[in-house]
Image (cartoon, rainbow, N blue to C red):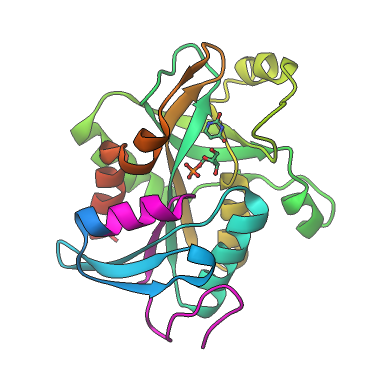
Amino acid sequence: MATPHIDAAHGAFAEICLMPGDPLRAKFIADSYLEQVECVTSVRNMFGFTGYYQGRRVSVMGSGMGIPSSAIYYHELMAYYGVETIIRVGTCGATLGAVNLNDIIFAQGACTDSTFNRNRFGGLDYAAIANFELLQIATARAAEYTSQFHVGNIFTTDRFYDADPNLNTLFERYRLLGVDMESAGLYSIAAEHGKRALSILTVSDHLIRGEHASAEQRQVGYQTMLKIALDTCLEL
Ligand SMILES: O=P(O)(O)O[C@H]1O[C@H](CO)[C@@H](O)[C@H]1O
Ligand SMILES: O=c1cc[nH]c(=O)[nH]1
């Protein structure tokens, strides 16, 4: 039952799927945390794996960067592969002085400059929000590992480069915690399919202070976020 972008067999994905943007971060998560792991799809090198985390069947798959790429995978997994829950494990840029590099952000909601949700929601503004149960479980787990986390609104953008510098002032005024490129799309797709989604993000860049993590850290770092996401799976 392959789809245009996933060539896994029926039932190859678990009901829960962790999804970073980076397919090599997906491989890192599978290699580091899952047992009895199988690579279930590799179309376009967008690797997907299924295995067991402390006895719980879990999948992990890359989504690519931005709503156009990630929406394809979110849709195909939820519509055709029986995935009920997607937890995005991504990186973000911080837009508030009180948020620091390596802090963890739980995206309770996601504003956006993308027209993706508006186009599908009759031209109106869709309020893209996380699943409350997932948010509750994950934030409770986070408190066991770190105090360096924040819960609130973020901004999902289509543009990694050349953003309007005035946006940072706007983000600060509205207390947006960070910027990513997928969450607003993930939340609307999950809602449309009657599924659950949550974005957990680690701050890899500080957009006001000009601080940046290395490429290696983005691929194999951020273990606290990964542990929080995996522990959340155990309670679902
Ligand atoms: O680290 P990931 O999950 O890819 O997330 C962030 O990193 C990418 C940009 O570098 C975008 O996909 C953005 O959302
Ligand atoms: O979208 C993103 C992700 C990480 N860092 C950023 O500045 N933007």
Looking at the picture, does residue 106 appear above or below residue 188? Answer: above
**Image spot of residue 177 (x, y percent):** 52, 25
Residue at point 74%, 15% (across, down)? 166
Which residues fall within the magenta stretch?
1-30
Residue at point 41%, 26% (across, down)? 213
Foreground residue among 233 and 126: 233
Ligand 2 lies in quarter: top right
Q: Say whether residue 107 is visible.
A: yes
Q: Is residue 231 on the magenta stretch?
A: no
Q: From the image, give the main secondary structure of the stretch colored magenta.
A: loop
Q: Say whether residue 235 is visible.
A: no
Q: Is residue 15 on the magenta stretch?
A: yes
Residue at point 42%, 62% (across, down)? 85
Q: Quadrant of the C terminus?
A: bottom left
Quadrant assignment, res 4: bottom right
Residue at point 40%, 18% (across, down)? 100
**Image spot of residue 231 (x, y percent):** 23, 51
Q: Is residue 124 left or right of residue 182?
A: right
**Image spot of residue 55 (x, y percent):** 15, 67
